[in-house]
Image (tube, grey):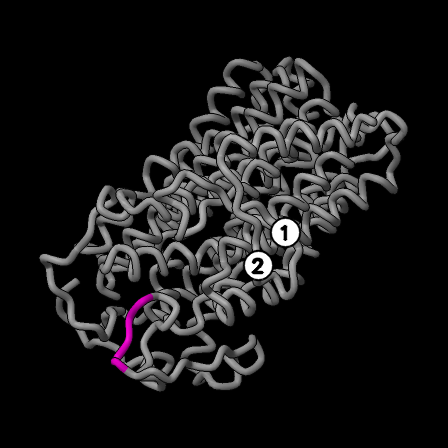
Amino acid sequence: MSGGLTISNPAMDKSTDHLTEMGISDGSEEKKQTRGIVELVKSLTWRERFFLLSLCSTAFAGFACLSILAPFFPDEAEQKGISETMVSLVFSSYALCAFLAAPVVGLLVKVISLRLILIGGIIVTGIATAVFGMLGGIENGDTFLTMCFLVRIISGIGYAAYQTAIFALLSIWFPNDIGVVMSITEILVASGMSAGPAIGSIFYELGGYGLPFYVLGGFMLANVVLALVALPAKESFESPVEEDKEDHPGNLDIMRIPSAIFISIAICMTALIWTALFPTLQPHTEEIGVGPSGTGMMFFVQMGLYAVVGPFAGWLSDKDPNNRRLYISGGCFFVGIGFFLLGPSPWIPKLEQTVALDYISVSIIGISLGFAIVPCFGAFYQVAHEDGKFPNNMATNGVVSGLWTSSWSLGEVLGPVVGGVLSENFGFETAMTVVGLLSIGLTAAPSEEEEEEGTTLLFQLHRGLKDAVVVPQDKVVMFLLLFYDRLSA
């Protein structure tokens, strides 16, 4: 990005202790005190608050647009003769496009204004959402399915653009509070993910198939105004750290770091786990007499609890960055337990399927996802700056943001497909058991000291989450077998 006025960002200027947890320092030994959400917001100028508000509003609207289909689309598609597997592919299609597009967008940050990328992504997503609402009038099942795929793919391009831009802007403006700022945006992301199904079910019952998409599509487009005000064209949103073009990393440069590979896998798997419920929960709840509004409420409870826990997970991640991967592993372990209960798993034969158990299960999943997801963002930047020795500049943060979005999108591609295919062919109980096992598998997170020795870090609840048990790789299988044995006893 060239030309324009570089913003002097007080959030960065206030501290010369640059990114202690991200590997950038001015040589001072003093560590910056971690701030909570309230302290952070109080310290910001009105301009910075509006900037953060505009990004959060975009994240909320965008994820509401993406999740709006969950409570009613499977039933609409079934009426047109579309199988559960194909419905799952519709859910996944936008994420597949985002998976492919996000790394490209991350590289384009070097040459295209983040302002243009953000606003362009908002416009594309808003229009595509509204157009999706027009597809309900198509009677032919094959034509309906084809158009659904096309519009969702276009939505994926918009999603990759605005999401990558949001992450890059946050990492530049709020480097010392990346976990807390990430948790703020995740509150809005979770709110959007939970509000989408709830809003969708309400407007679907009020005005039919098209109304939910028109409402949320219009709301998404309204965020263009906020972005235009928050990001004036005359200003350039660049890092205050001097950039050296020779230090600009590419996607492969980051992914050559062993820790980055693990974090990418963790991001991908948590997204898979998150989205596996989108095409499967509504048919499951229908069997026990729960309608679209009730299903939407379950999504709301899950995402709402995630939004509540997220800020604490972000604060803890910033306060204790060396244990970020431990928090991720612990969160994934309890997410797996939640899915075992949601089925309920056939390994727990005495547990009966009830509405109350479903609410308990989605509550456990929502709380645990806060620890599984939020620390990943700071951990990715930490790895890039510390292990990779890449500079804290727009180029590096743009590439990392693109990889984060791509990893998450790959999980969103796989989640509905895995959940839908398994549920259709083997039943909901088996599908949730497999997803639970995948989540528990992430508790075997490689520690920095043992990466070269082939050992893994199994999550343990020790004093203050400071300790962990290190075991050989081949014992992870034994751990899972013993876990299965105890469940089936």
- Horizontal and vertical percent for residue 279? 64, 29
Q: Tag 1: residue type?
A: Gln
> Is residue 377 visible to us here?
yes
User: Crowding near pointer 2: few (<14 within 10 Å), some, many (20+)?
Assistant: few
Q: Tag 2: residue type?
A: Asp
Query: How far apart are the two marked residues, 2 and 1, measured between alpha carbons?
Result: 7 Å
What stretch of residues is rendered in magenta?
23-27
Residue 341 in the image: above or below residue 303: above
| Residue tagged 2 | 467
Q: Label 1: state its secondary structure.
A: loop
Q: Label 2: state its secondary structure.
A: loop
Q: Residue at x 16, y 72 (%)?
A: 242
Cβ–Cβ under 8 Å for marks 2 and 1: yes
- Horizontal and vertical percent for residue 147? 47, 24
Q: Which mark is residue 371?
A: none
Residue 408 in the image: above or below residue 284: below
Q: Looking at the image, which is closer to me, 104 or 113?
A: 104
Dominant secondary structure of the residues highlighted in magenta in the image? loop
- Horizontal and vertical percent for residue 389? 23, 60
**Magenta stretch contains residue 25:** yes
Q: Residue at x 57, y 45 (%)?
A: 458
In the picture, measured across the screen, residue 262 lies left or right of residue 390, that is right
Q: Quadrant of the C terminus?
A: top right
Q: Residue at x 41, y 47 (%)?
A: 450
In the picture, measured across the screen, residue 44 lies left or right of residue 36, that is left
Q: Quadrant of the N terminus?
A: bottom left
Q: Looking at the image, which is closer to me, 376 or 187?
A: 376
Residue 321 in the image: above or below residue 142: below
| Residue tagged 1 | 460
**Sequence-wise, which precedes: disc 2 or disc 1?**
1
Q: How many marks?
A: 2
**Magenta stretch contains residue 235:** no
